Image (cartoon, helix red, strand yellow):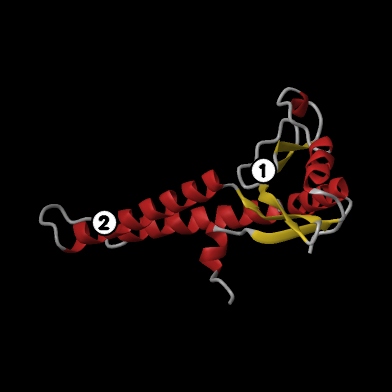
Amino acid sequence: MSRSFVARLFDNSTPVRYRCALSIDDAVGHLLRGTETSRVRALYKPCMFGQVTRDRVQLQRVIPFVANSWKPVFEGRFSEEVGVAVLDGSIGTSRATRRFMKVSVGFCVLWSVGAFLSVTVMPGPQLPWWFPLAGLGMAAVTLALSAAASTASAADRAWLSQRIGDALGCNAS
């Protein structure tokens, strides 16, 4: 089932699965060798940075001196199927960024509702008729910036998927 445009802006994660002909421990070791775990070394060279354990894998692309809250993050975990390691997860915007977007757009909608009530119901000095539209405008600008940032980060999604596949010696399915 296809999700709506706004739902995709709030959660643009894509499920990804990597099946490799290794044991889980070997797959964890291979992925860990392809991952930078030191924040200091990640400051001066582009790399795949994050945490790799059997139960939790969280990876992101780091480009020195570039901050991007909309950059894709891989979140997943290892499991075993028929003697081979399987890394199941999703690549999408970080949870913190998704929460920020929901709170921000929610505030804008709440602003519009309050402004509409102020314009129509509240006695006192009359506010301009367009006052409630300001909140909707702020929400639209917020969603447009989110869409632009997600689009600009599309290459990072492919890069991250390729690096994970290379480290494990398999392709995403």
Identify residue type, mark 1: Gln
The N terminus appears in which quarter of the rendering? bottom right
Q: Distance between the residues labelled 1 and 2?
A: 42 Å
Q: Which mark is residue 115?
A: 2
Q: Which mark is residue 132?
A: none
Identify residue type, mark 2: Ala
User: Considering the numbered disc 1 on the image, is that residue within a helix, a strand or a loop?
Assistant: strand
Near mark 1 (Cα within 10 A), the count class, few <14, some 14-19 or many ≥20, is some
User: Considering the numbered disc 2 on the image, is that residue within a helix, a strand or a loop?
Assistant: helix
- Given residues 64 and 118, the one toward you in this image is 64
Horizontally, residue 113 falls left or right of residue 19, namely: left
Which percent across, then down, holds residue 128?
26, 58
**Please, which residue is most extreme toward the front here?**
83
Determine the image quadrant of residue 171: bottom right
Determine the image quadrant of residue 110: bottom left
The C terminus appears in which quarter of the rendering? bottom right
Relative to residue 156, is residue 53 depicted above or below? above
Relative to residue 35, is residue 124 depicted above or below? below
- Given residues 74 and 112, the one toward you in this image is 74
> Which numbered disc flags the more N-terminal residue, 1 or 2?
1
Give the number of the mark in front: 1 or 2.
1
Number of dots carrying numbers: 2
**Please, which residue is most extreme toward the top here?**
40
Which percent across, then down, holds residue 112?
32, 58
Near mark 2 (Cα within 10 A), the count class, few <14, some 14-19 or many ≥20, is many
The structure residue drawn at horizontal position 74% and vertical position 30%, both measured from the top left corner, is 37
Horizontally, residue 167 falls left or right of residue 139, namely: right
Q: Name the residue under label 1.
A: 58
Which percent across, then down, holds residue 10?
53, 58
